[in-house]
Amino acid sequence: MLGKYLTVNGVQYPNPAKFSLSIKNNEAVNLSEVYTELVSVNRLYKFGFTATMQVTSYWRDKIIADCKKPLSVVTVDGETYTGRLRASGLDLEENSENTKGTRGLWTFKLTFTEL
């Protein structure tokens, strides 16, 4: 999917199994006495994403370390964003602890929110 286009703190991450972008606009909309909209724009185009990744125990440890950092620099498709990378779920695949060269295969759910 994204391949070499997704990096976190300068490290190229493996391809996500699922990837969803989100764009949020922070605006306060009020009505005047004559019912026209009065808009106060606080922030437009606040970038974020959710991703599901299937990784080995090596990548699990690396991603957990990145999620514990207060801020991360993420590059998606050539655009760089600074924000919070957080884990929202982690599942061990059944019987994967028997896979040679790893302590298990994991499905990781990540969220990123731009500052």
Image: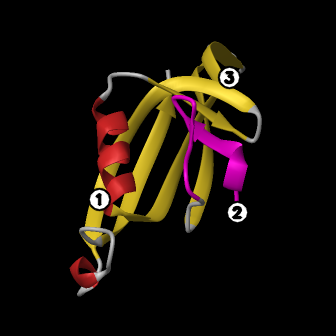
Which is closer to the viewer, label 3 or label 1? Answer: 1
Q: Which residue is mark 3?
A: 35
* Residue 1: assigned label: 2
Q: Earlier in the sequence, mark 3 or mark 1?
A: 3
* Residue 89: assigned label: 1
Is residue 36 shown above or below 16? Answer: above
Q: Regarding mark 2 in the picture, which secondary structure is present there?
A: loop
- Is 12 inside the magenta-drawn segment? yes
Seen as rendered, the residue at the extreme right is 78
Q: Earlier in the sequence, mark 1 or mark 2?
A: 2
Q: Residue at x 32, y 78 (%)?
A: 100
* Residue 104: assigned label: none
Q: Contact (CB < 8 A) between labels 3 and 1?
A: no
Distance Cα–Cα, label 1 vs label 2: 21 Å
The disc labelled 2 sits on which kind of residue? Answer: Met
Dot 1 crowding, Cα within 10 Å, few <14, some 14–19, many 20+: few
Residues rendered magenta in the picture: 1-14
Which is closer to the viewer, label 2 or label 3? Answer: 2
Residue 69 percent across, percent down from the top left: 32, 26
Distance Cα–Cα, label 2 vs label 3: 46 Å
The disc labelled 1 sits on which kind of residue? Answer: Gly
